[in-house]
């Protein structure tokens, strides 16, 4: 029975060694996974920061473009108003000149007849 106990003791030691090895392998696996997780979190934080900065830059550029468009629209509206005013004024001048020409033609006809 003593040899059976020694055999069992050897088996228990072997199992204890295997458990210790598996525990060490498992710990190393968890450490590796933890490092991978930490690296991933760092990369994701960096990505998020860069994305937020890019979006902020795009937002600023869009805001600037909107302001530029508003200025262009105001200038265009001013040009339209000025163009309409100029066209109206020219039309009035043309009508006035026609009236003057008609008056002068009447005077010339009257002078020819007299």
Image (tube, rainbow, N blue to C red):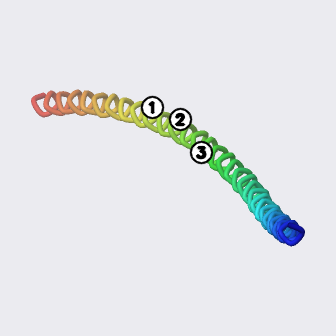
Residue 65 at x, y percent in the picture: 58, 45
Disc 3/disc 2 C-alpha distance (Å): 18 Å
Image quadrant in which the C terminus is located: top left
Q: Residue at x 13, y 34 (%)?
A: 112
Mark 3 crowdedness (10 Å alpha carbons): few <14, some 14-19, many ≥20: few
Residue 48 appears left or right of 20? left
Disc 3/disc 1 C-alpha distance (Å): 28 Å
Residue 95 appears left or right of 68? left
Residue 46 appears left or right of 58? right
Mark 2 crowdedness (10 Å alpha carbons): few <14, some 14-19, many ≥20: few
Give whichever of discs 3 and 1 has the lower sequence position.
3
Q: Can I make out residue 28 in this image?
A: no
Picture layout, residue 108 above or below residue 49: above
Q: Are marks 1 and 2 in contact (CB under 8 Å)?
A: no
Tell me the residue that label 3 is attached to.
Answer: 62
Residue 8 at x, y percent in the picture: 83, 66
Tell me the number on the disc at residue 74.
Answer: 2
Question: For residue 15, what is the image quadrant?
Answer: bottom right
């Amino acid at each position: 029975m003593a040899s059976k106990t020694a055999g069992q003791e050897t088996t228990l030691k072997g199992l204890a060694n295997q458990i210790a090895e598996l525990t060490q392998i498992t710990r190393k696996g968890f450490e590796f996974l933890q490092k991978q997780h930490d690296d991933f979190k760092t990369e994701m934080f960096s990505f998020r920061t860069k994305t937020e900065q890019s979006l902020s830059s795009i937002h600023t550029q869009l805001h600037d473009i909107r302001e530029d468009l508003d200025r262009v629209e105001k200038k265009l509206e001013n040009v339209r108003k000025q163009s309409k005013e100029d066209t109206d004024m020219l039309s009035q001048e043309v009508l006035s000149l026609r009236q003057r020409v008609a008056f002068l033609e009447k005077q010339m006809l009257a002078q020819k007849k007299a």
